[in-house]
Amino acid sequence: MLGIYIHIPFCKSKCGYCDFCSTTKYDDKMMDGYLKTLVTQIEEFFEGSGKKADTVYFGGGTPSVFGAKRIGKVLKELRKHVEIAPNAEITVEANPESCDKAFCKELKKHGVNRLSLGVQTAIDSELFTIGRIHTFKQAQEAVKTAKEYLTDNISLDLIYGLPDQTMDSWDKSLQAIIDLNPTHISAYGLRLEEGSRMYKMNLELPDDDMQADMYLYAIEKLKNAGYDQYEISNFAKNGRVSRHNSKYWDLTEYLGLGAAAHSLYGGRRFGFDGDIEAYIRGDIQLSESEDIAIEKKYRKGEYIMLMLRTAKGIDEAEFYNIFGEDFKEYGKKLEPFIKNGYAEYDGMAYRLTPKGYLISNTIINELI
Ligand code: SF4
């Protein structure tokens, strides 16, 4: 079963930390043009393909700015050419200021059953500093509206390591998010990419040690509130993990459509260029393309890297089934990390501990 990602590159304003492909200069004509190219791409990739999908994910950008009607049209077009499973997970990302009753009701009509809301912090002064245009109260209202008119399957995004953020304010944010009782929480450490506005501002940020403390604190607090960590940055209650994002980690095929969308599809890993206006004109260029062996059995390094980011870790029997090779040799390299509390082995599987996630790149480099 395929995963389908649709990139929507429109935002009301640009957040200070963001370097994603999105524009704030748009109007209805431009969004209609974007929709038209999406429809063309869907036809090109899927007409007569007989493909089946069980996850669809609208990310961005801000899909709620694109509007529920256009999202509905994309879904309608997808259903014409792809067999979408009856129990498919269909997620739409939204921001609190553009997630209202009409939006939720319309999404429900089109079968959307999961909402991912960018909350980032519950402290209004921190929201202001990072250039978000909503308050925490608006986020609370959006969650309430979504639960009433769309779904209770709601994921909330949080960021730690923000300017002026303290352990105390981080604790308040976590508690406020837990109080909203979402099914899923993603918590990311702030990384300022060169293209972002905040990168150039020379801001005082919590140092690496403080970020590490915030991360470990979040894992413990979320665990006590019933959220199981199933990936470095992701936590779910009652098993309601993101089925779509899980495809990225276990190397299932997915196709990304829209400007700057990436794919692992048809034996290739590729991405489209992020020039939004060129995309609307139908001038769709690849920003990268790599022929790869699509089958997992040829992709050992990638498998190890991705699975060690998950709580499942690397199951020895599964590894042997896929690669026809014992994981023990790699296991030996993990021994010093196990001894020092960065990884663990339960007799069947190897996985990193929360402390190990903090230095996951080092451990993975050591292994592969
Ligand atoms: S963080 Fe999200 S809402 Fe903010 S500018 Fe980037 S894509 Fe848009």
Image (cartoon, rainbow, N blue to C red):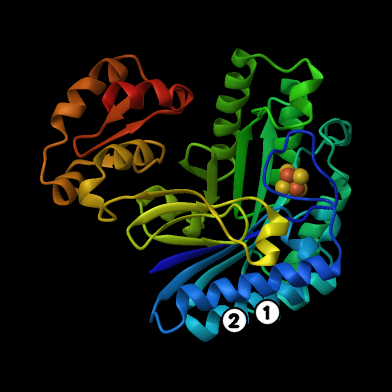
Q: Is residue 198 above or below residue 248?
A: above
Looking at the rendered structure, the secondary structure element under dot 1 is helix
Classify 10 Å Cα crowding around label 2: few (below 14), some (14-19), many (20 and above). Answer: some
Q: Is residue 127 above or below residue 61?
A: above
Q: Is residue 6 left or right of residue 106?
A: left
Based on the displayed image, in which of its 4 quarters is residue 78 positioned? bottom right
Check disc 1 and give the amino acid type. Lys
Find residue 77 and name its label: 2
Residue at x 40%, y 77% (from the top left corner): 51
Find residue 265 and name its label: none
Residue at x 35%, y 52% (from the top left corner): 251
Q: Nearer the viewer, residue 349 or 255?
A: 255
Residue at image mark 1:
73
Residue at x 41%, y 76% (from the top left corner): 52
Check disc 2 and give the amino acid type. Glu
Tags 2 and 1 in contact by the CB under 8 Å rule? yes
Classify 10 Å Cα crowding around label 1: few (below 14), some (14-19), many (20 and above). Answer: some
Asked if residue 116 can be seen in this view, the reply is yes
Q: Nearer the viewer, residue 98 or 287?
A: 287
